[in-house]
Amino acid sequence: MSAGPPVDIPPRLAFHPAMVHAVRKIVIVGGGTAGWLTAGVIAAKHKSRMGAGFSVTLVESPNTPIIGVGEGTWPTLRSTLARIGVSETELFRQCDVAFKQGARFTGWTTGARDDFYYHPLMLPQSFGQLNLVPHWLARDDGRSFCDAVCPQGRLCDDGLAPKTIATAEFEAVANYSYHLDAGKFAPFLQRHCCEKLGVRHVLADVRRVNLAENGDIRSLDTAQAGEFEGDLFVDCTGFRALLIGETMGVPFKDCGDVLFCDRALAMQVPYASDAAPIASQTISAARPAGWIWDIGLPTRRGVGHVYSSRHTSDEDAERELRAYIGPAAAGLTARKIPIRSGHRETFWKRNCVAVGLAAGFLEPLEASAIVLVELSAKLIAEQMPACREVMDLIAARFNATTHYRWGRIIDFLKLHYVLTRRTDSAFWRDNLLPETIPDRLKDLLLLWSHQSPWFHDEFDRVEEVFPAASYQYVLYGMGFRTQVEASALEGDAKNAERALRENAIQTERLRAGLPRHRDLIRKIVEHGMQAV
Ligand SMILES: Cc1cc2nc3c(=O)[nH]c(=O)nc-3n(C[C@H](O)[C@H](O)[C@H](O)COP(=O)(O)OP(=O)(O)OC[C@H]3O[C@@H](n4cnc5c(N)ncnc54)[C@H](O)[C@@H]3O)c2cc1C
């Protein structure tokens, strides 16, 4: 048998070049939630290298304020904060934090007074092993999907907290995230990153970005602190997108043709008394040309109207917001924030990666911005290129994953609009125009008329932002009907019966055992939670 032609083995394999340009200096520009979360996640992941040649520097303008909104978060924030070593008790003490257990959507389906549904943060009973949708549909007993499969809607209705004072930090009885004061959160993270993680903080305005011959960013000139060189630059400059947009010239992909809202009016509303109940869910109330968010913090509510300027005027939008708030709005001023739905065409170009508003923004309907910051920061930290020579490979991966995530979030947000039966205003009617609905979403809706969302629908990525469970809650919360074949019930009927019964028992147990939301927050602030 022939041994085949001789193979030339080069003395030095081409794919093992010397590490010529090690990546050691990470420079983040921007000190909002995106900048500090990214700094914290990278510094915590590379803790043993910090100070030993590896550094994280955050440059923040003393003259451009952070956006200061963004009060709703996703449960991922618990693990992110635990990972970077934050104390949850201190978070409650310093950032005016309340628990969030989901979102209550009112008026989205018909606009009638009793029209509401929950998108809770707990998964349906036995999710993963058993799809309860066909069994719930077959029963048709008048119970909402959420109440049939999950206790959390009832916990929110009752004003209860998702844990007790005996539950350790970051652990939950019912899954939760936070409502927080965005103006306090960034400084809180800053203190932690600088004092505990060795991040260097520089207060200076970036005036010029200097490029190397190959097109990489070489350094930044600042007005107050001189020049900063770096190996990897993270653009967290918010809507300005100073590095990824202005310097690297990456275009913005507008998606206002799918998601119409382009303005927000925000107000901070005091409670009638210190003892007023705090909602532990975001309230999203549909309006003729958009929707209103209502978020309860311990000391105030954050209430805002997100609307389409094509469908209403600023004056009418403000009137709508004031009418929602009622007498408490008298004397308050509304802050107007222009928003542009869309994202960068690419997120990591050469040695520059964008995170947060610099990467893009979608209307805050499901609080998807900060979770994307967390996921991006984690991906950068975990895949931190060892050297410039491998950076473009990692950038390509990062871009593929991040594109996937933005696409899925756009689909999921649009889902809330396309299931409406409202025809009372042009805003709602226009949302149903087929050309405004992404093709993938159209295909899925067709499929879901015959089978309910499940893992086969490509919701199978690690760290999927909105899993099949989220689609189930929104679809069936809004009265979508799936024509279930009898075969979908076969084999699982007894287990499903048991799971639905178990949910009813668990709901009553939790309703009897969990404290009132405001009472628990007061206890946490006074006595603290058990550290993990
Ligand atoms: C109306 C509205 C509601 C929202 N609600 C939610 C929500 O409920 N949940 C959610 O997850 N997200 C929400 N978001 C998004 C959320 O607010 C942001 O994703 C988050 O705050 C991160 O912002 P950022 O850090 O990217 O930008 P910013 O907070 O704007 O920070 C930008 C930073 O860049 C710095 N900077 C700018 N130019 C320079 C320069 N030349 N030199 C140095 N530094 C510079 C600034 O000083 C600042 O520190 C909302 C956004 C809006 C507009």
Image (cartoon, rainbow, N blue to C red):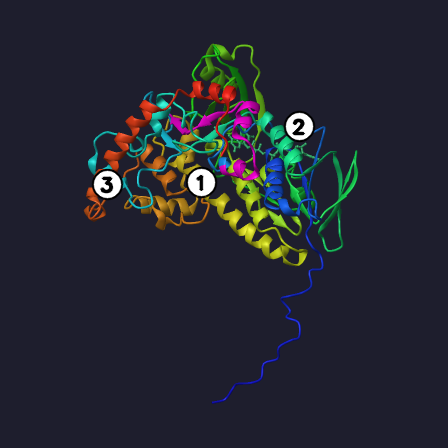
Whether the residue under disc 2 has CB within 8 Å of ligand 1: yes
Q: Pinpoint residue 299: horizontal percent, then vertical percent.
A: 52, 17
Look at the numbered discs 3 and 1 and tell me whether their residues touch, using CB distance below 8 Å. no
Amino acid at dot 1: Thr
In the rendering, which numbered label is found on residue 496? 3
Residue under the point 66% across and 52% down:
350
Question: Within 10 angstroms of label 3, few (less than 14), some, or many (20 or more) residues?
Answer: many
Query: Against 364, is 454 above or below?
Result: below
Relative height, residue 278 to residue 473 (above, below): above
Whether label 2 touches label 1, CB < 8 Å: no
Q: Is residue 116 left or right of residue 395?
A: left
| Residue range highlighted in magenta | 79-106
Disc 2, SS: loop
Q: Earlier in the sequence, mark 2 or mark 1?
A: 2
* Label drawn at residue 372: none
- Real-space Cα distance between discs 3 and 1? 37 Å
Residue beneath disc 2: 65
Q: Residues within 10 Å of mark 1 (few under 14, many from 20)?
A: some
Left or right of residue 134: residue 523:
right
Is residue 364 left or right of 210 when viewed as pictured? left
Q: Is mark 3 within 8 Å of ligand 1?
A: no
Give the amino acid at mark 2.
Pro
The amino acid at mark 3 is Ala
Instruction: Tell me where residue 418 sits by quadrant.
Output: top left
Q: Where residue 474 sits in the image (x, y, percent)?
A: 36, 35
For ligand 1, which image quadrant applies?
top right
Cα distance, mark 2 to mark 1? 35 Å
- Quadrant hosting residue 28: top right
